[in-house]
Image (cartoon, rainbow, N blue to C red):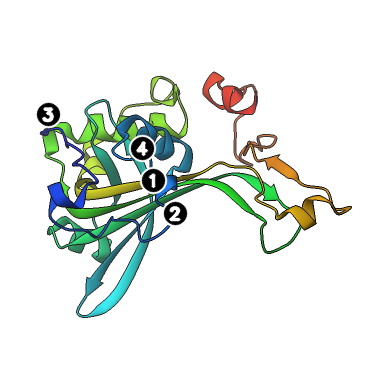
Amino acid sequence: MTEPVSLPSTDPALNGGGRTQPSRMSEKFPGNDAAALRRLVADAQVAHVSFALQEQPMVLPIAVAMDDDGQLLLHGSTGSRWLRVLGEGIPAAMALTSIDALVVARSAFESSMHYRSAVLFGHCVPIEEAAKTRALDVLTEALIPGRTSEVRRPRSKELAATLVLRFAAEEWSLKVSDGWPEDPEDDVAGPAWAGVLPRTPRYQEAIAAPDLRPGIGLPSSVAALLS
């Protein structure tokens, strides 16, 4: 098993960087809340990882999951040049965002969103071969809980073709916006509606593959995502 990732403090006086220090609206930064970060990872499911390659800025959208040890896991093809570069341990940044609601104010200026976002700075480390299957199970279960028990185990050829990385965070910050519209008094006295419109992403009706053999029903893991 790989060594667990410890998420460092967001306090720049402790982590020595200051890259995560808020420049405004500090009330939206709840501090070093690892449980809130875990929930964000589970809800966002996709991270954007940025890095520099030969002085050219790059960004890689990629599925992400967190295991029970607090490790942030990424995976992709060993044929991906960008993923291989990340695996060399170059400095990288990760961004995660979940949009939870629209804040509908009485003016366009005051309208906004409920959101949770995180920015992490660090580097990637390849997962050892002995721990790769477990890491891939974590990634699969994060997207489709229960699916690993319904399908065959990965073949050695598939494992060899897959690169799994953990993101070792050196600094990180979490930002949460969840308030009501902050309309000025003259707008509150006006006729416009104001409130919050919660957003709950959900999957629509499952579409069977055209080559699915007759008699194979919807698996319980997929059905659970539709309930």
Mark 2 Cα shell of 10 Å, populated few (<14), some (14-19), many (≥20): few
Mark 3 Cα shell of 10 Å, populated few (<14), some (14-19), many (≥20): few
Q: Which residue lies furthest to the right in this view?
A: 191
Question: Which is nearer the N-term, disc 4 or disc 1?
Answer: 1
Looking at the image, residue 33 sits to the left or right of residue 130; the answer is: right
At a point 44% along the width and 42% down the height, the residue shown is: 45
Numbered circle sitting on residue 37: 4
Residue beneath disc 3: 1
Q: What is the C-alpha distance between the residues marked 3 and 4?
A: 22 Å
Q: Is residue 28 visible?
A: yes
Q: Give 77 or 145, whichever is nearer the viewer.
A: 145
Mark 4 Cα shell of 10 Å, populated few (<14), some (14-19), many (≥20): many
| Amino acid on which the number 2 mark rests in the picture | Met
Which tag is nearer the camera, tag 3 or tag 4? Answer: 4
At a point 56% along the width and 27% down the height, the residue shown is: 222
Query: Mark 2–mark 1 contact, CB under 8 Å?
Result: yes
Which tag is nearer the camera, tag 4 or tag 2? Answer: 2
| Amino acid on which the number 3 mark rests in the picture | Met
- Image height check: is 97 above or below 131? below
| Amino acid on which the number 1 mark rests in the picture | Phe
Residue beneath disc 1: 29
Counting from the top left corner in percent of width and height, residue 40 is at: 42, 38
Numbered circle sitting on residue 25: 2
Counting from the top left corner in percent of width and height, residue 151 is at: 41, 26
| Amino acid on which the number 4 mark rests in the picture | Leu
Question: Which is nearer the N-term, disc 3 or disc 2?
Answer: 3
Which tag is nearer the camera, tag 4 or tag 1? Answer: 1
Q: What is the C-alpha distance between the residues marked 3 and 2?
A: 40 Å
